[in-house]
Image (spheres, coloured by chain):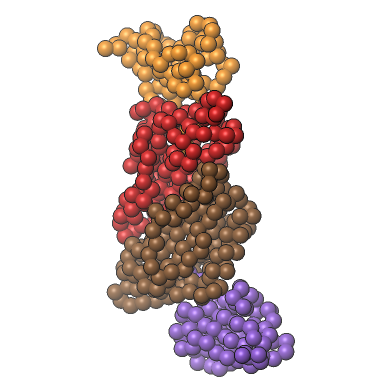
Chain colours: A purple, B orange, C brown, D red
Amino acid sequence: MHSDTITVRFFARLREELETETLEMPARPELTAGDLLEELAGRGGAWSQLNGEQPVMVAVNQAIAKPSTGIKAGDEVAFFPPVTGG
Amino acid sequence: MHSDTITVRFFARLREELETETLEMPARPELTAGDLLEELAGRGGAWSQLNGEQPVMVAVNQAIAKPSTGIKAGDEVAFFPPVTGG
Amino acid sequence: MISIQIEDFDVAAEHSALRSSGAGTGAIATFTGLVRDSGDMEGVTGLCLEHYPGMTEQVIAGLIEQASQRWNVREARVIHRVGRLTLSDQIVFVGVCSAHRGDAFAACEFIMDALKTSAPFWKKELTKDGEHWVEQKNSDLDKTKTWD
Amino acid sequence: MISIQIEDFDVAAEHSALRSSGAGTGAIATFTGLVRDSGDMEGVTGLCLEHYPGMTEQVIAGLIEQASQRWNVREARVIHRVGRLTLSDQIVFVGVCSAHRGDAFAACEFIMDALKTSAPFWKKELTKDGEHWVEQKNSDLDKTKTWD
């Protein structure tokens, strides 16, 4: 039932520092992952780090994406630090 | 008790075709592995293949050697086809 | 076979599964990663691993697919643990069986290298002085570049 | 650990031994070679392996020594079977543990490649139409050259 929203997820250090696991945000035409990141960075405080200070990776619908990737209603967008598994 | 002889060993296809596992041969000054091979090839029959027709590897005292490697009394010399383990 | 799990895994069972992949299999290459006492910092006592459920499995399936296009891969098995791990615990397993030795080695190392830079896992190191998130190493990124 | 033996080996036991090499071990790479149904000829039903006792062990010890000089090798274990083997039987095992992933992979593959061209083993393939000695492959020699 997220027909006009976007689900935004955070992982690892970002999840901890933003004290946020999931956000529902309104969808809008011609929105990109980069726009979303900029909007979130504008919240100030810990959120400012999304403004390019730290490397942030983005996934759209569980596939690695770029800042230019378009986001539409119902999409799942995730922001996280560079991965360190294995 | 091989104070004046050399032990010569053969493996795999060579052992089978020469029908020989081990030979005792007399040592002599300035003998090389290559000399030994030539001498054995001179026996004719299956032994002729030691005369360069087929690739033959040589080991002296259980370490890979060259035709020019010197052989002295008491040494163990082995001739065998290229290895195919693993 | 891809499994993201909290429980430990049994390398012997994985090896048996790879071995039973048929009479055309001539080579099995495996890699196992363990928690060691010096990661980013000295004195590591354990790890806590987080992942992105769903995406992780898709990324790894894509890596196996890529490896299968480049090399003879009869089967690949990848297991990655998440949650809390202590020193010497097994973290990750990658096993590949192939007709040929070179292909088994290459596919196994490729999957492992690519997993480190593209599968969404994050490690937090636990030391007696506290905990910290591990930073991605340039050496890992460089390894992935050598496969391109 | 180097063993030339007629009996089968247990990969799980080898893996455990490598794992118990201490808290500095972060990576274990293994290779297992199996008898497959198409070697030099199609329809292989088994192998008979001959070796040069004494020299074999010395050559393999030398390869482990070389690998240890080039890479971080905490321990290496090599097992090679001799005698009669049937389809899908295990022939050879090379396992290396290291602090680092890249070192474990490289040392394991180096030892395995070099063993194929320098350790005195000879394989006779058995098929239903008879038996024949396997010829050395140029591809194996080329692989060894890439390490020089």
Write the residue at 55% across / 43% down: C24
- In the rendered image, residue B58, in percent from the top left (x then y), is placed at 46, 22
Q: Quadrant of the N terminus of chain A?
A: bottom right
Q: Can residue C140 be seen?
A: no
| Depth check, front residue: B66 or B17 | B17
The quadrant where residue C63 appears:
bottom right
The quadrant where residue B72 appears:
top left
Q: Is residue B2 above or below residue A2?
A: above
Counting labels gives 0
The quadrant where residue D20 appears:
bottom left
| Depth check, front residue: B86 or D114 | B86
Write the residue at 37% across / 64% down: C8
Write the residue at 65% across / 90% down: A3
- In the rendered image, residue C143, in percent from the top left (x then y), is placed at 54, 59
The outermost residue toward the left is: B1
Q: Is residue C64 above or below residue C19?
A: below
- In the rendered image, residue C33, in percent from the top left (x then y), is placed at 42, 60
